[in-house]
Image: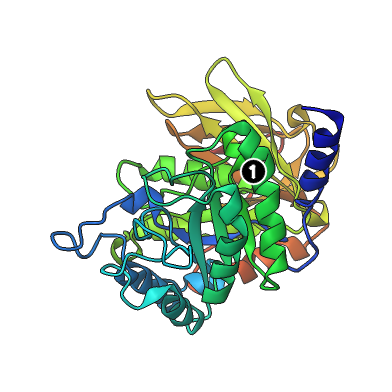
Amino acid sequence: MGPLAVTQLLGLISLTVALDNGLLKTPPMGWMAWERFRCDTDCKDDPENCISEALFRDTADRLAEDGWKELGYEYVIIDDCWMSLLRDEHGRLQPDPSRFPGGIAKLARYIHDRGLKLGIYADMGTHTCMGFPGTTLDKIEIDAQTFASWGVDYLKFDGCSSNPVEHMLGYPLMSKALNATGRPMAYSCSWPVYIGGLPPNLIIGNFGLSVDQARSQMALWAIMAAPLIMSNDLRNLDNSARAILQNKVAIAINQDSMGIQGRRLLQEKNHIEVHWRPLSHSASVLVFLSRRTDMPYLYHTSLAKLEYDAGNYEAYDVFTGSTVTGLNATTELTFSINPSGVVMWYVYPEQQSKQTEMLHDLHNKASQFAFHKAKPGHLTVL
């Protein structure tokens, strides 16, 4: 690649700098089809679970009526397999006519009428990951215009069937094309997936996760400031999964306005990890994660050992709802952590009593708070 080409490429990459347009100032929240419903296109034998406008209408209804929207879950995102196998006579992508008979614009209006936003999927390359029409470099502008004309609010732009050079060219070009439409659209660029990885969707309430594993995913996504994009069946969600996904304190931590991603402080030989994230108002969050598979493990530590300054603190256990007062940096702490589970603490300086008031505000009136005074020198959390 010559100097001119490199200069042009750097110019394109510079176009991907985030705009101050009010979008995605905190991690996006919503629901996406892929992890739960994959590429089920058999609407004849599996009408409730196939990728169709009915599935996305049903999901929009659940988000609007079951308390999700008020918590910030606002995007309903179509993933792969929504398209017809052929573009229309004008070269535009089009939905499968049997599964989306009303079209995407009508579906967008349905979702917007419920105070929600519509997301859609495209793939840079000749084909999508599942073999539907892709967006080659020459189709980027027309596809961006098509999505804008439909009222789309969010684009997931994948990268199957393309190479690293096309990624370097195509992802910035799509950013520019979306901005040129004049319609505010969140841009979920999959480029990092192909050069290192990104956190996937929340699969809490899906098949195969225990309650402890579900809490672990929610806690780590909050620590990482990762998108809270669920992929489950909101029409058939059990109460434990709902309680984890609707945990107002975990959501507030994820959405903290400082926007600083957490990090792993410790990775112990006993297969316990400690993760930490700084938050607004001098607060922070600690996650004690067990990678063990045998039995609950008693983990001993103190705030001082976790790099906290001397002083007095209070802590709120995000998943049990209990508050611990009277802590100082040298108080010996003992946590019982279930296999593949977590203990998640919201920690704040004791003098900031408003922190406790904030926690009360985050929970509904039915929430029960248990307050524990730490014994001098030692605290055991079971």
Residue 85 in view in this figure: yes
Image-quadrant location for residue 352? bottom right
Decide if residue 148 is on the left or right side of residue 283.
Answer: left
Q: Nearer the viewer, residue 277 or 58?
A: 58
Q: Quadrant of the N terminus?
A: top right
Q: Which residue is mark 1?
A: 224
Vertical comparison of 120 with 1: above or below? below
> Which residue shows up at 55% across the image and 51% down it?
157
Residue 382 in view in this figure: no
> Which residue shows up at 70% across the image and 73% down it?
182
> Which residue shows up at 39% across the image and 56% down it?
33
> Which residue shows up at 43% across the image and 73% down it?
104
Farthest left residue in view: 45
How many discs mark residues in the rendered view? 1
Q: Nearer the viewer, residue 51 or 239?
A: 51
Decide if residue 22 is on the left or right side of residue 205.
Answer: right
Instruction: Kindly state the secondary structure of the residue where label 1 is placed.
Output: helix
Vertical comparison of 110 with 284: above or below? below
**Percent position of residue 68, x then y:** 48, 70
Identify the amino acid type marked 1. Answer: Met
Decide if residue 40 is on the left or right side of residue 80.
Answer: left
Q: Nearer the viewer, residue 359 or 177?
A: 177
Image-quadrant location for residue 267? top right
